[in-house]
Image (tube, grey):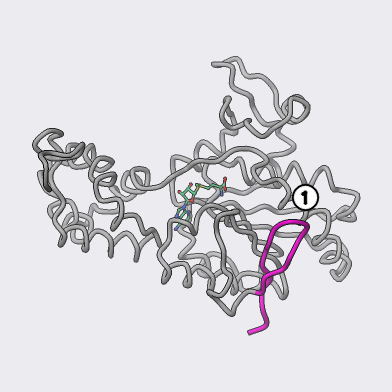
């Protein structure tokens, strides 16, 4: 590097340098395992985030850490820490609510009309973080119940990160999770806890949600073909490379039922990138439906 040490230079931070080769090895490992594409442009951020892991394992180079991940029989113990260090878990209640309103208000009513009575509607929240998205689905479903003809709802919510799934199961939240929630929604769906001003989701809203630690790259071994009526995978694929995004699309295509919708985050797009999904225009956003193969 020219002009002296930068902010993450190992001479000033004590964080080992990451060579091009180490970067390539790590990048391949994380992309294969988790779909994540975090390295090329963000080498310094990754070095910084993994510093504690190298220290915890008393290792002095990223090559040593990489070899441990690939070769050690105890590598699986390290993976949750690696995931915690590499993922962005940013989320909040009723994020991009217009998509949830569209699904429960416009799409689901026509899906349920064609179903045998009593059959549940199954929705997947893929990359659910600490649960705000899955519980928002339960809230918006509740508010649209009359349109859903009383169909029971199952929300399956998965994330790679075990610590976020534990938080989701506890269902206690603080300030930043409520940035898009009205005071009325907070009042109606949450109760104060005795601890630290947190709010606890009311238990009847927890009932339809099942959380599970799962890599979405393993979706097809966890759920049967055609199982879901909708997939919400928002603000997740943005961290994937083109090839792992394509693998994820193939998995969503497999687990969705015929013609069912896939909702992505507002900065994510499949336009011109896959034939497995067809873009559909809603009021002022695009979502996708499973194309016939
Ligand atoms: C930015 S958060 C988005 C949360 C929520 N979907 C939303 O839009 O508010 C991304 C989440 O995706 C999860 N994630 C990333 N890669 C994943 C994978 N391969 N399988 C399952 N979850 C993954 C991360 O752990 C993180 O919690």
Name the image quarter holding residue 202.
Answer: top right
Q: Observer-nearest residue: 3 or 240?
A: 3
Q: In this rendering, is residue 228 above or below 164?
A: below
Which residue is found at the position 58% from the left and 42% from the top? 131
Residue occupying the far bottom of the picture: 293
Please report the bounds of the magenta region as a residue range: 278-293
Which residue is found at the position 91% from the left and 49% from the top? 146
Residue 291 magenta-drawn? yes
Q: Position of residue 209 (x, y in %)?
A: 66, 47
- Left of 43 or right of it: where is 266? right
Name the image quarter holding residue 282.
Answer: bottom right
Which residue is found at the position 71% from the left and 75% from the top? 258
- Left of 60 or right of it: where is 282? right
Q: In this rendering, is residue 2 above or below 52?
A: below
Task: Count every numbered label the image shows and give the total.
Answer: 1
Q: In this rendering, is residue 39 above or below 28?
A: above
Which residue is found at the position 58% from the left and 70% from the top? 271
Residue occupying the far front of the picture: 3
- Left of 186 or right of it: where is 243? left
Q: Observer-nearest residue: 291 or 161?
A: 291
Q: Position of residue 281 (x, y in %)?
A: 74, 65
Tell me if mark 1 has few (under 14), some (14-19) or many (20+) residues whose alpha carbon lies within 10 angstroms of its own. some
Q: Position of residue 134 (x, y in %)?
A: 64, 46
Residue 125 magenta-drawn? no
Q: Position of residue 155 (x, y in %)?
A: 67, 52
Q: Quadrant of the C terminus?
A: bottom right
Q: In this figure, which residue is indicated by the disc labeled 1?
A: 101
């Amino acid at each position: 590097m020219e002009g002296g040490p930068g902010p993450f230079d190992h001479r000033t931070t004590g964080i080992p340098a990451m060579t091009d080769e180490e970067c390539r090895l790590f990048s391949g490992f994380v992309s294969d395992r988790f779909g994540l594409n975090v390295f090329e442009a963000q080498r310094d951020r990754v070095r910084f985030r993994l510093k504690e892991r190298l220290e915890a394992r008393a290792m002095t180079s990223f090559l040593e850490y990489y070899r441990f991940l690939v070769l050690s029989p105890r590598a699986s113990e390290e993976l949750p820490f690696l995931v915690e260090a590499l993922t962005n878990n940013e989320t909040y209640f009723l994020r991009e609510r217009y998509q949830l309103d569209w699904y429960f208000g416009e799409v689901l009513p026509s899906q349920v009309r064609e179903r045998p009575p009593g059959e549940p509607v199954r929705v997947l929240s893929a990359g659910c973080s600490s649960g705000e998205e899955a519980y928002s689905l339960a809230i918006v479903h509740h508010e649209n119940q009359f349109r859903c003809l009383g169909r029971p709802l199952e929300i399956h919510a998965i994330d790679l990160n075990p610590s976020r799934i534990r938080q989701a199961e506890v269902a206690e939240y603080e300030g930043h999770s409520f940035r898009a929630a009205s005071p009325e929604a907070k009042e109606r769906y949450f109760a104060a806890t005795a601890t630290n001003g947190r709010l606890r989701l009311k238990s009847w809203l927890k009932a339809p949600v099942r959380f599970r630690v799962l890599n979405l790259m393993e979706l097809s071994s966890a759920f049967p073909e055609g199982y879901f009526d909708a997939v919400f995978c928002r603000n997740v694929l943005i961290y994937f490379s083109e090839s792992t995004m394509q693998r994820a699309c193939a998995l969503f295509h497999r687990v969705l039922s015929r013609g069912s919708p896939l909702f992505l985050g507002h900065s994510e797009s499949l336009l011109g990138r896959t034939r497995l999904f067809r873009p559909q225009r809603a009021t002022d956003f695009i979502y996708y439906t499973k194309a016939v193969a």
